[in-house]
Image: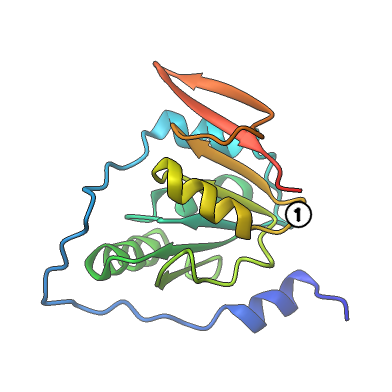
Amino acid sequence: MCYGRRAVAQQYYQPVQPRVVREVVVSPQPAAPSPSKAIDVALAGLNLTSEDLFYDIGCGDGRVVIRAAQLYGCLCIGIEKDTRTSTEAMLAVERAGLTDRIRIYLGDGLRADLSRATAAYLYLDEETTALVSRRLPAGCRVASFVHTLPVASHLSVVGSRPVFFWTPD
């Protein structure tokens, strides 16, 4: 069965309405957002096109998927396990007017279906980066800010911090 971009969008992207969350969820690790320069270097290094299905695992406030959709027109999926942060990301996507290109899901990136990803961005700890990388499909282009795997093919440096690139086998 052949999946065109529209078929994939219809199958995997169901409207997600932003909602107000009253409880506060404390993450085990405080999240620091990716710097804008690192995002731009990572996205450029991934060679994204409008045909890509781009994933940001641990998407935080959604800035990476928003930038990818704005610059490259690709379909994007952000996965965030923190309830409050995922709601903030959904609202940011709505404010950017990109709800037709981006979906934010509340969930664990280690349990999510990543089988259709053509490109992915990871800003996770080293252990989680390794675990998620094993779940990505062969041929998926991966960029990781700060943490790498031994299979990384090349890197760029943003300030004093690296952005690594690789493709899982």
- Residue 117 x %, y %: 66, 60
Residue 23 lies left or right of residue 128; in this view the side is: left
Q: Identify which residue is drawn at 62% across, 44% down.
A: 142
Q: Identify which residue is drawn at 47% across, 70% down.
A: 99
Quadrant for residue 96, please give it: bottom left
Q: Identify which residue is drawn at 11% across, 77% down.
A: 22
Q: Identify which residue is drawn at 52% across, 39% down.
A: 144
As shown in the figure, which amino acid type bears the numbered disc 1?
Answer: Ala
In this rendering, the answer to whether 5 lies above or below 141 is: below
Residue 18 lies left or right of residue 8; in this view the side is: left
Q: Residue furthest top?
A: 160
Residue 130 lies left or right of residue 88; in this view the side is: right
- Residue 56 x %, y %: 49, 55
Assess disc 1: are there few (<14), some (14-19) or many (≥20) residues with their C-alpha within 10 Å of its C-alpha.
some
Label 1 secondary element: loop
In this rendering, the answer to whether 116 lies above or below 136 is: below
The answer to which of 87 and 29 lies nearer the viewer is 29
Residue 8 visible from this viewpoint: yes
The N terminus - image quarter: bottom right
The answer to which of 146 and 63 lies nearer the viewer is 146
- Residue 160 x %, y %: 39, 16
Q: Label 1, on which residue?
A: 138
Coloured how? rainbow
- Residue 16 x %, y %: 42, 80
The answer to which of 4 and 131 lies nearer the viewer is 131
In this rendering, the answer to whether 82 lies above or below 6 is: above
